[in-house]
Amino acid sequence: MSLYTSSSELKVTAAIVLVLSAVELGMRAIDDKLSLDLKHINAIPSSVAELDRQPAPHIVFLGNSLTRVSILLKVITEVWPAAPSMARIHPDDTTLLDWHYIYQRYLGQAQSHPNLIVVSFVGSQLDDNQALHLDRLGAHFAGFQFAREAFKHDVRETGDRVEFMLASVFHAMANRERVQDRVLASIPGYKELAKAINRSVRAKADKPAPQSGARSYTRLLRFLAAASACGDKVLFVAIPLPSSYKIADELRAAIRDGGANLIDMQGVEPLTGSDFPDGYHMSEEAAPRFTRSLGRVMTENKFVQAALRVGIEH
């Protein structure tokens, strides 16, 4: 009886392994087709390599979909004489910890370091209280290469560590939410419902933190320490939303103490609620106007000028 049971278990296990292997091969074959965002993530190494081949100084705009929509490189070149070589990295729904590992994995090890990292953010996206995205951290941003650092500082629970490692090995695990979205998108009315839920979630996430206690920025300081160790400068840009938000004094102090600089772009370019059709991202008409304003501000910023001057001298 035990031999029969053992043999059956082995067959079932072998069948599961075969199915998982087939799913994994299929996932790897359609990786770039699951979403434009995943295609962008997979293209990060080639984008960095292409920037390496361009003349110094270099600027990398790092952020999420707000960076993708709001900061247009072609428009910046229109207002910036002899503009530096530039690139954008903007995986959707990412925050400070994701950007920290993106920098470590892709930019900090680049042959020719970007002289200036421009991190665009809104609300509390630089705070320590932002939720972890274990699937993306394991698969795309930290991975095996930075698992030790992630386990020491960020991924502390056993279950979370298992999920992190599974995502780093299996594309099917890492991209399960994207597959789920593809399936659900075939249901009539799902896309509209998903957009409404996303707007609600973002509105709650971007509300100011309670004033009962000071915010913490240990992740931010780690990010700035990593950039400083590579000789790269960091500029933070606060992106406008339909409703203004306060930049905490603790955040300003952490940026200053970390040797970085901050530009608050709220109110610099007149924008109204109609310029944010989904309640979060700028419209196609508003984004070029905002980008021109940002380009002009950056050309006049002494911190930016100094960072790029070092790039030319080296």
Image (cartoon, rainbow, N blue to C red):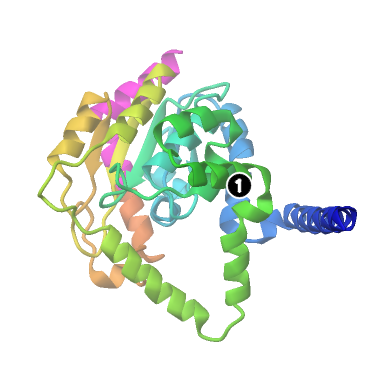
- Which range is magenta? 294-314
Say whether residue 62 is magenta.
no
Say whether residue 298 is magenta.
yes
Q: Position of residue 1 (x, y in %)?
A: 87, 58
Helix, strand or loop status at disc 1: helix
Say which residue appears at 61% left-offset and 27% top-offset: 53
Disc 1 marks which residue? 167
Q: Is residue 198 above or below residue 245?
A: below
Report the amino acid beneath label 1.
Ala
Left or right of residue 159, residue 179 in this image: right
Q: Position of residue 172 (x, y in %)?
A: 67, 55
Q: Residue furthest bottom?
A: 188
Find residue 110 and report its image quarter.
Answer: top right
Left or right of residue 222, residue 39 in this image: right
Say which residue appears at 21% left-offset and 28% top-offset: 256
Say which residue appears at 14% left-offset and 41% top-offset: 214
Q: Position of residue 31 (x, y in %)?
A: 69, 54
Q: Position of residue 269 (x, y in %)?
A: 23, 55
Q: Is residue 173 above or below residue 262?
A: below
